[in-house]
Amino acid sequence: MRDTLTFLAELACNNNREWFTANKPRFVECRKRFETFAADYIRTLAQLDPDLADLQPKDCIWRIYRDVRFSADKRPYKEWFGVFPAVKGGKKSMHGGYYFHLQPGHCLFAGGIWCPSPELLKALRKEIEANYDEVEAIMSTKQWKRYFDDFDTEWTLKKVPAGFDPDFVHADWLKRKAFTFSTPLTDEEVCAPDLLDRLKDIAAAAKPMNDFLNYTFEEYGEFTRPCGR
């Protein structure tokens, strides 16, 4: 991972087509190494969640090229690598999964459901409101507390949405616009030889919450994604 982090750090300082073209062989080599890692990561996670066993790296890894057509940020390349094993399509899935993000100084593991459609978000809020004691039980375990705290707060409404009780004991959860949870990883940790073991342990802590969130699909049906990753 060290060479890949070095490449990504240099890319962040030289995010232009001229530099990238000159360093394309380095990118290709880094990409191949990350694909090998992703395959190992998927196999490791499949020991916890057999539904992931049929996923391939191409199902779970994003292209490095950014879509800048409608963005004020015209940098042509992503400055990170990411892999998202999840049932029902990997990176295209709306289900909760096991995201690993590789970016110098910003590496992390994340679980849960990101960017849900309005109908899925409403269903998730209903499920949490009706079964908040299950969420409390998951968050009270030693395994959870070792890596996570609460749902991420990056995407949060100012008020409880209409149709939900503003006096609900966990009204802050109902304000969430995404139900993700994450833990940071240092560059040293992602370069260590025990990275897969560490990620497997974190994923084991994440699985009960993923299972709880994914039950929404069984309870309310399938949903469509409003935006890409």
Image (tube, helix red, strand yellow):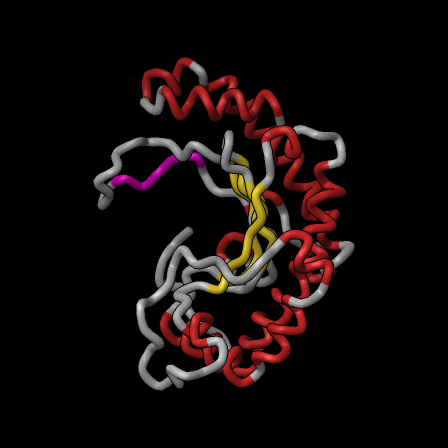
Residue 45 visible in rendering? yes
* Relative horizontal placement of residue 195, taking residue 173 as reference (left or right): right
The span picked out in magenta is 64-68
11 left or right of 50? left
Asked if residue 58 can be seen in this view, the reply is: no
**Where, by quadrant of the figure, is residue 216 drawn?**
bottom right
Q: Is residue 152 above or below residue 76?
A: below
Q: Main secondary structure of the magenta part?
A: loop
Q: Is residue 63 above or below residue 47?
A: above
Q: Residue 224's spot in the image, x, y percent?
A: 41, 68
Examine the structure image and report whether residue 107 is included in the region drawn in magenta: no
- Which residue lies at the image location 50% right of the left edge and 17% below the top edge? 25
The residue sitting at 74% across, 47% down in the picture is: 44
- Between 189 and 48, the one lying in front of the other is 189
Q: Position of residue 146 (x, y in %)?
A: 68, 53
| Relative horizontal placement of residue 200, taking residue 119 as reference (left or right) | right
Residue depicted at 61% across the width and 65% down the height = 210
Q: Position of residue 202 (x, y in %)?
A: 68, 51
**Image height check: is 211 above or below 29?**
below
